[in-house]
Image (cartoon, rainbow, N blue to C red):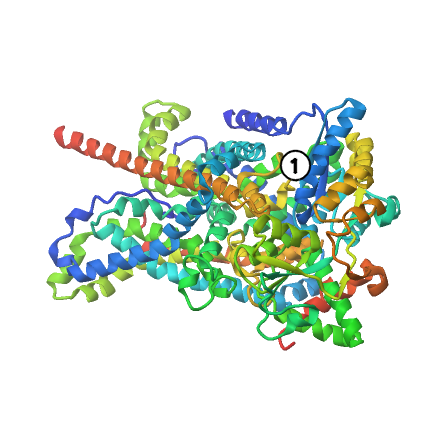
C-alpha cells in the first residue's frame, strides 16, 4: 500500500519534449474528460452541500452553528480527534521506525495488520467494540463494577476513531523512511549521538513533511468518521453525538439547512485540509529547490 | 529476530507497535471471531451462505468492482492530465482529488442522494433512475474510492524518465504504441494497487451508501447494512459471522495488495 | 518511556472528559418520531421538578430507530427511562438484561402507554393516484414508502395494520400474506427508520403514498408543506401503543429512580396529556381525548393482542429471521 498518499512535485513536467507530447486536440479531449469526471463526482456534491447550507440564508446558517447541541458535538469531535491523532502519531512513528530500520520475521504480517483497519468496514469496527465492551462482553462486569463507561461514552467514541484512523500515519511514513534508508542515522550514531538525538536531529527533520501530511489526513478522517462512531455512540444529545452524528440528527428532524450548515463546516475542514496540504507540498518543493541551489553553488 | 544495524530502539519501537496494534486492532477483531464461533460451523455456514447474504455480497462486491474499475480508468486519466498537461485551475483540481478522504461519508451520502434523486440537480436531467438503484450504490462507491488510483499512479508517472519515451519515439513507435508498450507496463503495478485499495475501501463502505441505495433486500442491500440489520435484531453472532466473512475477504485483498507492492518494488529494482 | 507517560496522560484525559455530575440527570432513550414531543415535555418537566423540589435537573435525550435504541440499551446504554415504539422491544430488554422485571407493562396505566397513535396514509396534495384505503396501494403504478420492519418499530405497525385490513377483507392468513407480498412489491425504498422514510417521501419526492405514524404525518404536513400533502384515513388501522418504562437497574445505580418515576407519571398528568395531543399523539385521559377529538379522525382500530395474539407472537411469525417478511423478498416469490 505504499505510496497511497504520497507527496509529490511536478518538477518533471517541463522536461517532456515534443516527441512525447500528444497532439493538441487529444490533449484537450483528455483534459476535458478528466475535468468532467471530477466535476460530476467531486465538485457537484461539494456545491450541493453549500447550496443547501445557505438555502435559508446566512441567519439560519449562523443559528444552526450556535445551537448548544451543535457546540457539544463540535467539542466532542475535537476531543476525539485530539486524542486519536496524537496517539496514532506516536504509534505511526514507532511502527515506521521498527519496520523500516530493522528487519525481523513477521514483518509482512505486522504491515498487513496495520493496514487492516483501512479495509475493515467501519460498521464491523463499531461492532467489535460493542462485543468487547458492551454488556455481553467479557469486560462488562469489571467495567460496571468500577463504574467505567467505555461504550456509549467518550472513550468508546475515541477508540472507534483511533481504529478507523489507525493506519494513516504509519502508512505515510513507512514508504518515506524506507526510501531514506538508514545511512544518515548510522553516521550520526557512529559520531557519538545518542539514539534520541539521532531521531530528533536526523530522522524527524527528514520525515516532517510526510508526518504532517499524515497528521492532516488522519485528522480529517477522525473528524468525519460516521459508521463506526454511530454504532458505539448511543446518540445522547449534547453528550455522545459527534459532528457527523449531529448532522444526521438535524437532518432527521427536518432541519435540512441546519444539517447542511454543520456539514459545510466539515466540508470547509476538508477544503482547509487540502489547502494546508498544498501549502506543505509547495514548501517542501521550495526547500528542496533551495537545497539543490545551495548544493550547486558549493562545489 | 535479528537486528540489522547499530540503530537503537528496536525493542522499544517494535514492542510498542506490537502492543498498540494488538490493543487497537488485534484484540477487537479477535472478539469478532470468538463471537462468530458461538454459532458452530453449521449455523455459521448457514448465516454466511443465506440467500439474502449472498445477494448482498453480490451487490457489495459487484458494485465495488464496477466503482473501482471506473476509478481505474478515470483515475489514470486524471493522474495523466495532472502530471503531463499544464492548464488553468490545475492546482485547485489537484487539491480537490483528496476531498473524499476528508468529507464525512454521511454528508457525502446525503449530498449525492440530493443530487441523483429524480428531483435533484443531476437526477432530473437523466431519464433513468440512479438513486435507490444499484447504480446509486456505484455512484457513492466511486466517490469514496476516487483518490486512490489517482494518488498511487500520480507519483509513479511523475518519476518516469522521459528518455524512455523519447527512445521509443526515436525507434519509430507512435504515441499509442509508446503508451501501450512502454508506459502502461510501468504504471500497471501502481494502477493495480490503486484499484485494489479503492475496491477494499468500497466493499466496507456504509455511511454514504445507506442514504442512496434504497436498502431493498436482494436488490440494493449492501453487506454492512445486513450486519447492522442483524445487530438490531440482537443477533450478535449472526452479525459477527457476516463480519468475519467480510474481514477474511479484506485480509486476502490486503495480502494481494502487499504482494503486488513487493512485486512492483522488485521489478523497479527494489528500493 | 515518554510514550508511556504520554499514554497515561491521554488515558487520564479520556476518563476526565466524562462529565462530572453537578446536577442529577436522567436519560430518556426514545425512538424517532418523538423528538419534538420530548423536547417540549422535558422542558416542562424540568420546570415542574425545580418548582416542587427546588432541584435543578437535566433530562438528556437519545433518538434513533426503535431497533437501534433497544439494542443500545441491551448493550449497555444506561438510560433511566425508555420510551419506545412497541412493547416487544421493551420485552427484549427485560428478557436479555434483567434491567426491568417481566411485568413491566402492568406498572403504569393503559399497558404503560400514556398516549397512543395509529397508522395513516400520507399522499400528495389532491391525491392524484386516488388512494382511499389499503387495497389502493397495490394498484398498478402506485409506489409506497415505508421503512424496514426489521429495524423500525413504526414499520412493524404499518405492516400489521395492512395485514389486519387484508385479513378482514379477504378472510384468511394466506390471502393476507399475498396482499402483503404484493404491497411490498410496490415499495421502492426501505429506509431503516421512520424519519428516513418521511425524508425520502417528502424531501426526495419519491413515492405516491407514505405509511406513517399519525403524528408523523401531521408533523410532515405542518413542518414541511401544508399545501403539499394530505392525510388519508384507511377503513381499518391498528391501535399503536408506544410504551414507556423506568429502567430500574440503571436508575437505581444513578440514584435517579425518583426522577425517572415522576417523569413517566408526568406523561399521564394533564400537562403531559396536553403536550401529547399538541404533538399529534392521541391522549388517553378522557378529558384530553375530548379536547383533541376534532384533530383526530375516527378510525376503526384493531389491537395487536386481539388480531395477532400479542407482540411476542407477531414478532416471531412475521419479523424474525425466516419469518413472513423475509419470505416476501425471497427470489421467485
The residue shown at (88%, 44%) is C107
x then y, percent, for residue A259: 52, 43
Q: Is residue A181 visible in this depiction of the protein? A: no
A248 lies left or right of C78: left
Say if C210 sits above or below C71 in the image: below
C116 lies left or right of A184: right
Mark 1 neighbour density, 10 Å: few (under 14) some (14–19) many (20 or more):
many
* Image-quadrant location for residue C22: top right
x then y, percent, for residue C166: 75, 71
Between B173 and C267, the residue placed more toward the observer is C267
Quadrant housing the C terminus of chain A: top left
Q: Is residue C125 visible in this depiction of the protein? A: yes
* Image-quadrant location for residue C172: bottom right
Mark 1: secondary structure: loop
Say if A244 sits above or below A194 in the image: below
* Image-quadrant location for residue A36: bottom left
The residue shown at (57%, 73%) is C141
The residue shown at (42%, 68%) is B127
x then y, percent, for residue A52: 46, 47
Q: Chain of mark 1?
A: A
Residue named by callout 1: A150
Tally of marks: 1
x then y, percent, for residue B88: 22, 47
Amino acid at each position: 500500500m505504499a505510496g497511497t498518499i504520497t507527496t509529490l512535485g511536478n518538477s518533471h513536467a517541463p522536461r517532456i519534449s515534443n516527441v512525447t507530447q500528444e497532439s493538441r486536440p487529444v490533449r484537450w479531449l483528455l483534459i476535458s474528460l478528466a475535468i468532467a469526471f471530477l466535476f460530476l463526482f467531486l465538485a457537484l456534491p461539494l456545491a450541493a452541500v453549500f447550496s443547501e447550507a445557505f438555502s435559508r440564508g446566512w441567519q439560519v446558517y449562523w443559528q444552526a452553528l450556535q445551537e448548544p447541541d451543535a457546540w457539544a458535538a463540535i467539542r466532542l469531535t475535537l476531543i476525539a480527534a485530539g486524542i486519536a491523532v496524537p496517539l496514532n502519531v506516536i504509534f505511526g512513528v514507532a511502527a515506521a521506525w521498527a519496520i523500516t530500520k530493522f528487519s525481523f520475521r513477521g514483518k509482512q504480517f505486522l504491515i498487513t495488520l496495520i493496514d487492516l483497519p483501512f479495509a475493515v468496514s467501519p460498521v464491523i469496527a463499531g461492532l467489535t467494540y460493542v462485543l468487547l465492551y458492551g454488556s455481553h462482553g467479557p469486560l462488562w462486569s469489571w467495567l460496571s463494577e468500577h463504574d467505567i463507561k467505555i461504550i456509549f461514552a467518550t472513550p468508546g467514541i475515541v477508540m472507534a476513531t483511533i481504529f478507523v484512523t489507525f493506519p494513516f500515519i504509519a502508512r505515510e511514513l513507512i514508504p518515506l523512511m524506507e526510501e531514506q534508508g538508514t545511512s544518515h542515522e548510522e553516521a550520526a550514531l557512529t559520531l557519538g549521538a545518542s539514539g534520541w538525538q539521532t531521531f530528533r536531529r536526523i530522522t524527524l527533520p527528514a520525515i516532517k513533511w510526510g508526518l504532517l501530511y499524515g497528521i492532516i489526513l488522519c485528522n480529517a478522517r477522525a473528524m468525519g468518521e460516521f459508521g463506526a462512531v454511530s454504532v458505539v455512540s448511543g446518540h445522547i444529545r449534547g453528550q455522545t453525538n459527534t459532528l457527523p452524528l449531529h448532522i444526521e440528527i438535524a437532518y432527521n428532524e427536518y432541519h435540512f439547512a441546519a444539517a447542511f450548515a454543520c456539514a459545510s463546516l466539515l466540508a470547509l475542514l476538508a477544503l482547509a485540509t487540502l489547502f494546508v496540504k498544498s501549502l506543505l507540498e509547495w514548501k517542501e518543493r521550495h526547500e528542496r529547490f533551495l537545497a539543490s541551489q545551495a548544493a550547486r553553488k558549493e562545489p | 529476530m535479528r537486528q540489522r544495524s547499530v540503530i537503537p530502539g528496536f525493542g522499544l519501537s517494535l514492542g510498542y507497535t506490537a502492543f498498540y496494534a494488538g490493543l487497537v486492532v488485534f484484540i477487537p477483531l479477535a472478539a469478532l471471531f470468538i463471537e462468530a464461533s458461538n454459532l458452530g460451523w453449521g449455523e455459521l455456514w448457514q448465516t454466511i451462505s443465506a440467500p439474502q447474504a449472498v445477494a448482498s455480497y453480490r451487490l457489495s462486491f459487484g458494485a465495488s468492482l464496477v466503482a473501482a474499475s471506473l476509478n481505474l480508468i478515470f483515475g489514470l486519466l486524471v493522474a495523466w492530465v495532472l502530471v503531463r498537461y499544464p492548464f488553468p485551475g490545475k492546482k485547485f483540481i489537484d487539491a480537490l482529488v483528496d476531498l473524499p478522504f476528508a468529507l464525512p461519508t454521511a454528508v457525502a451520502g446525503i449530498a449525492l442522494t440530493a443530487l441523483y434523486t429524480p428531483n435533484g440537480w443531476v437526477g432530473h436531467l437523466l431519464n433513468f433512475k440512479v438513486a435507490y438503484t444499484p447504480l446509486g450504490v456505484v455512484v457513492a462507491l466511486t466517490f469514496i474510492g476516487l483518490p486512490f488510483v489517482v494518488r498511487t499512479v500520480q507519483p509513479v508517472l511523475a518519476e518516469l524518465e522521459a528518455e524512455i519515451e523519447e527512445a521509443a519515439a526515436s525507434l519509430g513507435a507512435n504515441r499509442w504504441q509508446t503508451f501501450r508498450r512502454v508506459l502502461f507496463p510501468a504504471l500497471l503495478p501502481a494502477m493495480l494497487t490503486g484499484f485494489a485499495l479503492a475496491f477494499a475501501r468500497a466493499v466496507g463502505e456504509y455511511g454514504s451508501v445507506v442514504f442512496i441505495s434504497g436498502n431493498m433486500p436482494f436488490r440494493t442491500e449492501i453487506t454492512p447494512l445486513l450486519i447492522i440489520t442483524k445487530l438490531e435484531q440482537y443477533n450478535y453472532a449472526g452479525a459477527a459471522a457476516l463480519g468475519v466473512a467480510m474481514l477474511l475477504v479484506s485480509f486476502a485483498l490486503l495480502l494481494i495488495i502487499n504482494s503486488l507492492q513487493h512485486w512492483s518494488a522488485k521489478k523497479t529494482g527494489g528500493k | 518511556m515518554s510514550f508511556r507517560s504520554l499514554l497515561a496522560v491521554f488515558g487520564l484525559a479520556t476518563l476526565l472528559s466524562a462529565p462530572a455530575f453537578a446536577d442529577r440527570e436522567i436519560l430518556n432513550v426514545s425512538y424517532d418520531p418523538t423528538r419534538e414531543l420530548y423536547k417540549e415535555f422535558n422542558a416542562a418537566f424540568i420546570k415542574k421538578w425545580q418548582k416542587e423540589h427546588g432541584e435543578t435537573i437535566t433530562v438528556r435525550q437519545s433518538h434513533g430507530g426503535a431497533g437501534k435504541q433497544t439494542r443500545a440499551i441491551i448493550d449497555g446504554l444506561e438510560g433511566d427511562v425508555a420510551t419506545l415504539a412497541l412493547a416487544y422491544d421493551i420485552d427484549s430488554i427485560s428478557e436479555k438484561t434483567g434491567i426491568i422485571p417481566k411485568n413491566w407493562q402492568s406498572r403504569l396505566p393503559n399497558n404503560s402507554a400514556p398516549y397512543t397513535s395509529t397508522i395513516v396514509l400520507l399522499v400528495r396534495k389532491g391525491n392524484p393516484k386516488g388512494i382511499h384505503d389499503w387495497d389502493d396501494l397495490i394498484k398498478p403504478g402506485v409506489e409506497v414508502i415505508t421503512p424496514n420492519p426489521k429495524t423500525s418499530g413504526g414499520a412493524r405497525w404499518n405492516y400489521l395494520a395492512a395485514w389486519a385490513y387484508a385479513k378482514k377483507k379477504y378472510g384468511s392468513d394466506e390471502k393476507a400474506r399475498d396482499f402483503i407480498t404484493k404491497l411490498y412489491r410496490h415499495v421502492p425504498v426501505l429506509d431503516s427508520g421512520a424519519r428516513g422514510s418521511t425524508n425520502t417521501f417528502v424531501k426526495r419526492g419519491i413515492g405516491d403514498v407514505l405509511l406513517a405514524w399519525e403524528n408523523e404525518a401531521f408533523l410532515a404536513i405542518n413542518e414541511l408543506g401544508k399545501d403539499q400533502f394530505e392525510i388519508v384515513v384507511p377503513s381499518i388501522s391498528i391501535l399503536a401503543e408506544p410504551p414507556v418504562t423506568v429502567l430500574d437497574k440503571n436508575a437505581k445505580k444513578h440514584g435517579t429512580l425518583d426522577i425517572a418515576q415522576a417523569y413517566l407519571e408526568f406523561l399521564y398528568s394533564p400537562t403531559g396529556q396536553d403536550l401529547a395531543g399538541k404533538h399529534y399523539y392521541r391522549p388517553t385521559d378522557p378529558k384530553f381525548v375530548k379536547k383533541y377529538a376534532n384533530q383526530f379522525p375516527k378510525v376503526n382500530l384493531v389491537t395487536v393482542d386481539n388480531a395477532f395474539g400479542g407482540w411476542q407472537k407477531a414478532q416471531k411469525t412475521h419479523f424474525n429471521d425466516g419469518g413472513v417478511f423475509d419470505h416476501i423478498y425471497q427470489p421467485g416469490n
